Image: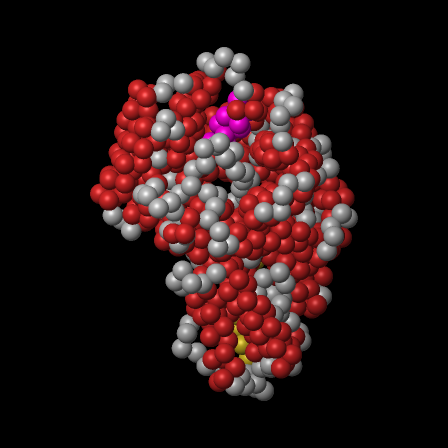
Amino acid sequence: MQSKISYELSQPVCSLLLFKLFSDHPARQAKKESRFDAALAIEQKNYDEAERILANVFRDFHQQKQVDSFCNLLPLFAEIAFARNGIDAATDTITSFVNRVKLIDSSAAVVRQLYMDAAEFYANRGNSKHGYDAEIRALEVALKEANADQTVLAQLQYNLGVYAQRLGQVQLSETHHRKAMQIREHDEKATNEHRYLSYNAMGAVMWYAFKLDSAAHFFNLSLAELEKMPPNPNNKYYRRSIILNNLAGLYAEQGRYTEGIRAQEECIRISQLFMNDPEPHPKKLAAEVGLYQGLDNLAGLFKDVGDFKRAGELLHYSYAKKQERLDEGHADIFISEVLLGQHYTDIREYDKAIVYLEKGLNKMAETNGEYLYWEADACFSMARALAALNRTEEAKQYYNRSDQLFKDSYNDSYDNSYLSYLRHTALFWANNNDLAKARKTAQQGYDYILKVQGPGTLAGFYQLLNLAEVHYIAGQYRESIRYADEGLKVLNGVVQTAGNRLDSVKMQMYHPQAILLHEKARYALAQNKDSVLLSSIAAQLEKAIHILEQRKFLVDDPESINILMAENAALLEFAKEIEMQRYRLTGQENLLDRFINLHESTLYTRIRSRLDQTQAIHFANLPENIYEEETKLKANISATLTGDSSTSFDDYLEAQQKWTHHLERLRKEFPAYYQMRYASLTRDWQTMQTSLPEGQTIIRYYFAGDSLYGLVIDRDKKNTDVVTGTFIIKPDWRIV
């Protein structure tokens, strides 16, 4: 899940003022009935009364020859039709209204503005396909005007770029935005606002091509233009929130996660300030949608640093708010379903993932909106979930479908979602014996990064790691070592740029995997697996486990830790196997201790997880009031995310802060309980051994590689006897 870049529609000359914004301001209304009275009637669902008022207002405009005011009425007529019978009825009403106005005045300026207002009506309903089509008609009309106004043409091209981006048609969006930018660069009437809009849009174009330096350049130019504009709520809050949202995603891709999270939280905070401003404003609905998108993006940032619990909470909160506040067919609702499907795929709850992804895909099929990007992303996640459930043929179908959709959406440009798709699909084909296709796909992603960024970036490391893994699966171990070596060198350089611990740990998220691939390939190539080789491999694996341990301190919930352990199970298993082989070669008891510690750590984590899933457990040496407080704090976090409309994101942040303070108190005042529930992944076997009762002997069994080991031990005995037997491990065996 990636951060989604956002930008606004350029406001038409004839302002589209939604009815809900005027209901609390009767003092603004004229004495005779006006469109504001109609808006109030619509809000009260008195549609017959609203139609009567609008008919009178239309007649007044006609009699007074105020033809340029007809555009104010179009969204209100459309809103009534939409409320009664949905989007198709609204479209019929818009067509009828435009034709009616044409009989009165068919001048290009009047008709063009009607289509532009129709387009924004559709946009506010989350229907970008209808919006794009209406804006195209506006452009066609404008191009027929003698001496067409270049400012208007730029505005139309810009808006078309926005609609195309929302539909996931990245290349089409770029085409429109480049045309808008070219016009504005030569238009003396272009304002700071025009430049702000186009610079931000071009930043998005560069983002979707993964040209991050260019994206940063344009976003900062946009911010500079914004600083020159009047400090009204629209500029101070709404537009600034858009830039912050975009910079947050950019910072994350550059490995600056601390800055990214701060920028995203500030984006959400000022979006709420804009929505809470008592003055009416036509951008408030767009700001509300932007707020939910900001929450989705913040969830993505938390997911990227391994905090799956917080990511899931934010996604569910955003989804609930969208269902409560947005129209039933709004695109952002099915976008939330896709994001939740991705989330459950990431945390390996594949059945839940499929349910959400099917919901999203079904809604997309009903819209006929050509939401290419989102359909591609949904199919990609569906393929991952099906592959994990060993439904390989179905997974192939979804990978192929996703591939075509991504190509249709991006053409020759790749963003981080497309690059992630290429990495996953390369591994899928490698694991399903299509090695030529796997190598070609992995190389495709790496070649693109070399072209747009060069080799020395975090994205370059990801692609090199992908190539290393594909070649390892293919049994080409020398090539795997070469790519892993290159990747590790790149990563070591990138980590030097980290500004703080969070950024450093996030940059190294796949560092353990790179070390593991490198060492497994070394092991596979070695003819003589002597103690020198094994010691060298063990040292590198210990380094990888240490990095893994650092990641644990970024999260404190069992769900995220379980995912962390599952993602790195192969590392821990290989480390166990190496330590057992070292012990068998040398007989050194400390090596056996290392083997046992690794095994007990994974077992301890599973026990901890089951304790967290069991509510009816009481803990010794922990006062009941402390446990009750802990339970209440956890419940408060959930309540802020699933409560009624009175709860806000600030409530969630406050609940999270209280939970962090609670954990610190546990660590200081109740260390035994803290160690059991929330502390380090690793366990000290020697400490556990000395806790055995006098006179008792235990036997423990361990798997390492394809061998089963039996360990006999008591409180004091140090000469441990190991009995080995080789077994065939069946695929359906599970460790319990």
Residue 254 is situated, as x and y percent measured from the top left of the image, at 67, 43
The residue shown at (46%, 49%) is 280
Residue at 33% over, 38% down: 76
- Image-quadrant location for residue 597: bottom right
Which image quadrant for residue 108? top left
Q: Is residue 93 left or right of residue 733?
A: left
- For the residue pair 731 and 551, the one nearer the viewer reads as 551
9 relative to 274, above or below? above
Image quadrant holding the C terminus, namely bottom left
Q: Residue at x 70, y 68 (%)?
A: 590
Note whether 598 is above or below 94 in the view shown. Answer: below
How far across and how far down the image is residue 30, in percent? 38, 45
User: Magenta-highlighted stretch: main secondary structure?
Assistant: helix
Q: Which residues are magenta?
A: 153-163
In this orientation, does residue 501 appear?
yes
Q: Residue furthest left?
A: 48
The image position of residue 71, as x and y in percent, is 39, 31
Is residue 582 or residue 207 the one in the foreground?
207
Q: Is residue 174 visible?
A: no
Query: Which is more toward the observer, 582 or 131?
Result: 131
Vertical placement of residue 131 versus 557, above or below: above
* Residue 5 vertical position relative to residue 719 in the rendered view, above or below: above
Horizontal side, residue 401 vs residue 153: left or right: left
Q: Position of residue 634 (x, y in %)?
A: 48, 70
